[in-house]
Structures are given as structure tokens and as C-alpha cells.
Image (cartoon, rainbow, N blue to C red):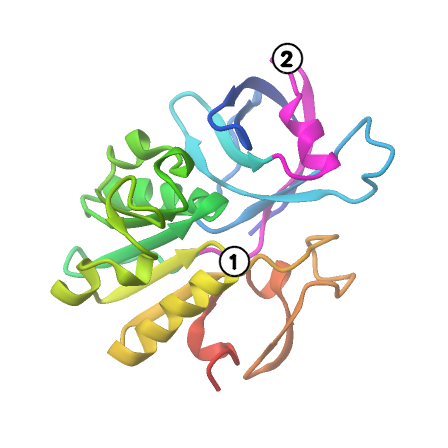
Amino acid sequence: MKKYLLDLKVKSVEQIHQRYVLIKLTDDQPLPEMLPGQFVEIRVDGSPSTFLRRPISINFVDRELNELWLLVAAVGDGTKRLAQLQSGDMLNCLLPLGNGFSMPVSGDEKILLVGGGVGVAPLLYMGAEMAKKGMEPTFLLGARTSNDLLMLDIFKRYGRVCVTTEDGSEGEKGFVTNHSLLQTEQFTRIATCGPTPMMKAVAAFARKTDVECEVSLENLMACGLGACLCCVEKTTEGNLCVCKDGPVFNIRKLLWQV
């Protein structure tokens, strides 16, 4: 897929949580084709300590409004700078990068999308693209508390939403792999993104129940093009660059449980 280096205009920056902002970008021309699971490398201007671009998952693409949404966790100097952007600012973006999730081709498939923290970001776009084709995904979203659940109202537009919180303040108490849904329903495929321990637990469940599963890895990335080799992951096919060969991998390629 062709890659573009674009200066995109900031349409809005919404503080949706004390640690997260939703940045909506637009352009005078139609935005390029982008797939669920791909990401954007963003140049951070004005930060003396941020020399490398920051990889951000594609959260949503609104074709009618010509908007690209990015869900950003403001945790370091670079991402905190992004959170301070104002409407009308320009953001230099390299996109779309990496390989996305495998999209279902038949409505007979029953797809479970499992996310935690900022890892819920790419699952919204995947669910929206499924809904566009007349399919209903099931979202299983986990967080520490009800206050940490992100964009629930928007997720509900595109599918069924099930929730776990570690303190039991919303949904079922525990981790995503503790949700009763996993014992009462069968799925043909799982896609997941979030903290590595969560994804490993979901992968273990998928292996145990013989369900196809893809995970979106969040290894440290710098170039986004497979040149710097800082995001290498050991796989059954040898060392692969997460930014170029992923970030989405079928768990059968990973050495997590081998």
C-alpha cells in the first residue's frame, strides 16, 4: 500500500480522560486509504527531547467528514506535546504504515475484539468497518476502573459492548479473560490490542479453545519502515520488524507459548 508524507490540519483536540486526548485531523484532499490495525508516524515539533516520530494507531477514519482520528495517551514529553495541539495547527504524518487486522469476508464469522487501555484504539475502526459491511462485532473492553473506559458510547454505535473493570465499578469484575462471555459463547476469530500481559492472556485463551487470534504488538518503534531494527520481535519465521511485518500478527507466528 502506498505511503504518504502529509501535513494534516488539526480539526479538534478533545480531552476525553485525564491521560488521553482524541485528535481529529483533516486535509484539503481526500485522505488516503487506511486499514484497521495500521498506524501513523507523527513528527513532534517544539520538543527538545523528542527526536523520533511517535507511532500512533489509527483510531477511526470518517470518510464523510474527511477526518482521521488518533487516540493519544499523553505519557511522555512527545505525546504531551501532541496533547497540547490547537485547532488549526499542522501535524506532519507518515501514513499508513504496517499491516492491519484480517477483515472478515463473511457475515457468518463471529468476531470478538478485545482491548485494554489505549489499545482499544484500532478496534474501533475495525468494528466500524465491519458494521459498514453489515456485520456486528462484539467488543470486550477492559480497564482498571469505570473512569478508565474510553469511548464506550462510540463503540456502542458499531456493535455489542461488554466490559470488565478490575475494581468492579462497571461491567464484570476482573480482567477481560475473566468475562463470562468467554465461557458462554463461541467465536470464530479474536483480534486484540492492549497491554502485553492482557494480549498474552487472550492469546492463551485462543490457543486453548482453538480460536484464530491476531494481536497488535506495541514494541518500541522509531522509523516505522523496518530500517532501524529497534522493534524486532522473535517469531517462528525468525526476527521480524513489528513496524513493517506487523504490528498485527497471528499468534501462531509468535513465540509467546512455544
Residue 85 position in % (x across, y down): 66, 20
* Left/right of residue 27 with respect to residue 128 in the rendered view: right
Percent coordinates x, y for residue 217 in the rendering: 54, 60
Q: Which residue is mark 1?
A: 99
Does the stretch in magenta take in 90?
yes
Q: Which residues are the magenta region?
A: 74-100
137 displayed left or right of 225: left
Mark carried by residue 44: none
Q: Residue at x 79, y 45 (%)?
A: 52
Image position, residue 235 (x, y; %): 57, 79
- Label 1 sits on what residue type? Asn
Can residue 10 be found in the magenta stretch? no
Residue 88's mark?
Answer: 2
Residue at 44% from the left image edge and 34% from the top image edge: 61
Question: Relative to 163, does residue 184 appear above or below in the rendering?
Answer: below
Q: Quadrant of residue 125?
A: top left
**What is the secondary structure assignment of the residue under circle 2?**
loop
For the residue pair 245 and 87, the one nearer the viewer reads as 87
Separation (CA) of disc 1 from disc 2:
30 Å
* C-beta proximity under 8 Å, tags 1 and 2: no
Which image quarter: residue 205?
A: bottom left
Identify the residue at horizontal 69%, vertical 21% (top origin). 90
Residue 213, located in which quarter of the rendered image?
Answer: bottom left
Residue at 37% over, 41% down: 124
Residue placed farthest to the bottom in the image? 258
What type is the residue that disc 2 sits on?
A: Gly
Mark 2, other Cα within 10 Å: few <14 / some 14–19 / many ≥20: few
- Residue 57 lies, with reference to residue 18, above or below; the image says below
